[in-house]
């Protein structure tokens, strides 16, 4: 799965961001350029593209072919969004871990926040403005309350000043009345921002403990993620308790409806463990680069990671069938295992054959523009409904609908990336 290569030859490219999210000087709701030169690990753009396309496939299935959804349970692919959260945790925590291990100073938080703002908001605001004021294709209410049988029901133009303020500041997911409104998938960007705000606190606290706690930097770097895992697990337990106390809400409403249980369920608090598991992967990656598991061949290491990935994927499927609230937690471990499976050889100064394969050019490009694809695909589906795009409730209809929506979305995302995202990433504070 890997071939030896000199450390200074490791293939790297400008660092990206994640779809649903966003990552490091780099993300993860999809995102990724020019500006102070940043480096990122090869092999992760393609999986980001696959994750974004998986989310689009699920939404197309929900809208156009509910019969296929019921028969195949394709909604499991919605866990692709969890991959974005894990990838954000990995990419954004990686600089902290590297500096902690090498005894350097903590990364500058000022530049960090500026990079996060310019990576997410220009594309988001542009797409929201066009979708809301030009296309009038924003959700005015949660789609859970109106259903998806008539694809554009509950959509139009948001005009209420307070609702617009929530949309412009990406805080709509913090209130029941605006949860899932505007650009429907943008709730995950709010969740990502929760992580963006917490990460520097975790990082700086870790550096502050460096001189006080006598432990290896790797163990020290695991304290923050450990705390976040506890927060995520406890919050999910609390959500379950609240849901049991309010049987008037269906499981769907408790996850996505206009109520405080859904707000908590979609919050960073409930999903903190997803990011934390990505952070742990960052610690493992740095440790591998500094000689950990040196007695293991890279092939043995990758087979172990592959076994972990498959085991936790099956555990995720079981959790999905059982309706467990901890499904994203299991899937996060599978996602982290996949990330390390792809890039573990790079940590050892070797070439990763998997990284070359996963960065297949079409998928890599989809990953590059995944933030805009993620944000555009819902307005595209709404407009397709209004224009009566012919999609039958059949397997052939699903294929046709997915291809049509994805291609239109890709064109719009490419234009947005070229004229909005890239210029914003070049901007210097």
Image (cartoon, rainbow, N blue to C red):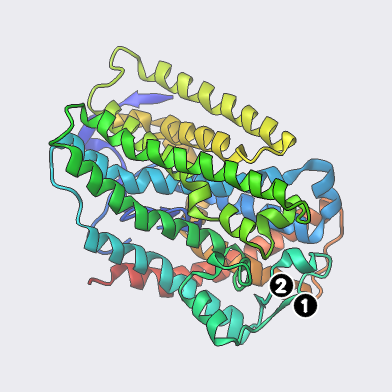
Q: What quarter of the picture does the N terminus occupy?
A: top left
Residue 383 placement: quadrant: bottom right
Dot 1: element: helix
Q: Is residue 307 above or below residue 19?
A: above
Relative to 146, 259 lies left or right: left
Dot 2: element: helix
Q: Is residue 375 visible?
A: yes
Q: How far from the left and from the top, in percent, is residue 166?
A: 51, 75
Relative to 275, 307 lies left or right: right
Residue 9 placement: quadrant: top left
Q: How far from the left and from the top, in percent, is residue 108?
A: 19, 56
The residue labelled by disc 1 is: 386
Residue at 61% x, 71% y is: 178
Q: How far from the left and from the top, in percent, is residue 104?
A: 13, 42
Residue at 64% x, 28% y is: 314
Q: Residues within 10 Å of mark 2 (few under 14, many from 20)?
A: many
Q: Residue furthest top?
A: 295
Residue 169 placement: quadrant: bottom left
| Residue nearest the observer in this picture, 164 or 261 | 261
From mark 2 to mark 1, how far is it between C-alphas?
6 Å
| Residue nearest the observer in this picture, 244 or 276 | 244
Q: Is residue 348 above or below residue 388?
A: above
Q: Is residue 163 above or below residue 1?
A: below
Q: How far from the left and from the top, in percent, is residue 280?
A: 38, 35
Q: What quarter of the picture does the C terminus occupy?
A: bottom left
Q: Which mark is residue 230?
A: none
Q: Which mark is residue 382?
A: 2
Residue at 49% x, 80% y is: 165
Q: Residue furthest front?
A: 245
Q: How many marks?
A: 2
């Amino acid at each position: 799965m890997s071939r030896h290569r000199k450390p200074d030859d490791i293939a790297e490219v400008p660092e990206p961001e994640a779809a649903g999210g966003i990552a490091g000087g780099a993300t993860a709701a999809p995102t990724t350029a020019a500006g102070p030169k940043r480096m990122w690990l090869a092999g992760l753009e393609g999986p980001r593209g696959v994750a974004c396309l998986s989310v689009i496939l699920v939404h197309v299935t929900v809208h156009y072919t509910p019969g296929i959804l019921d028969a195949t349970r394709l909604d499991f692919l919605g866990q692709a969004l969890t991959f974005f959260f894990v990838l954000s945790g990995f990419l954004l925590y990686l600089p902290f871990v590297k500096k902690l291990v090498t005894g350097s100073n903590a990364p500058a938080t000022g530049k960090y926040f500026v990079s996060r703002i310019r990576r997410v908001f220009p594309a988001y605001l542009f797409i929201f403005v066009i979708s809301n004021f030009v296309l009038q294709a924003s959700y005015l209410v949660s789609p859970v309350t109106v259903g998806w049988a008539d694809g554009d029901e509950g959509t139009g133009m948001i005009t209420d000043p307070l609702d617009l303020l929530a949309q412009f500041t990406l805080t709509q997911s913090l209130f029941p009345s605006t949860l899932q409104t505007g650009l429907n998938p943008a709730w995950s960007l709010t969740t990502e921002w929760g992580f963006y705000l917490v990460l520097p606190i975790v990082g700086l606290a870790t550096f502050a403990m460096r001189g006080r706690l006598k432990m290896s930097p790797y163990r020290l770097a695991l304290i923050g993620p450990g705390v976040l895992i506890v927060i995520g697990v406890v919050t999910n337990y609390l959500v379950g308790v609240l849901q049991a106390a309010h049987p008037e809400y269906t499981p769907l409403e408790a996850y996505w409806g206009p109520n405080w249980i859904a707000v908590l369920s979609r919050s960073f608090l409930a999903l903190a463990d997803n990011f934390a598991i990505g952070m742990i992967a960052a610690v493992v990656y740095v440790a591998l680069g500094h000689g950990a598991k040196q007695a293991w061949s890279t092939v043995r290491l990758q087979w172990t990671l592959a076994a972990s990935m498959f085991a936790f994927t099956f555990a995720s499927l079981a959790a999905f069938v059982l309706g467990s609230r901890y499904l994203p937690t299991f899937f996060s471990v599978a996602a982290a295992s996949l990330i390390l499976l792809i890039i573990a050889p790079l940590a050892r100064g070797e070439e990763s054959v998997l990284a070359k394969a996963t960065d297949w050019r079409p998928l890599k490009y989809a990953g590059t523009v995944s933030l805009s694809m993620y944000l555009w695909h819902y307005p595209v589906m709404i407009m397709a409904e209004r224009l009566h795009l012919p999609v039958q409730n059949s397997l052939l209809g699903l294929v046709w609908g997915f291809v049509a929506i994805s291609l239109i979305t890709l064109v719009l995302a490419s234009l947005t990336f070229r004229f909005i995202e890239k210029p914003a990433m070049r901007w210097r504070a």
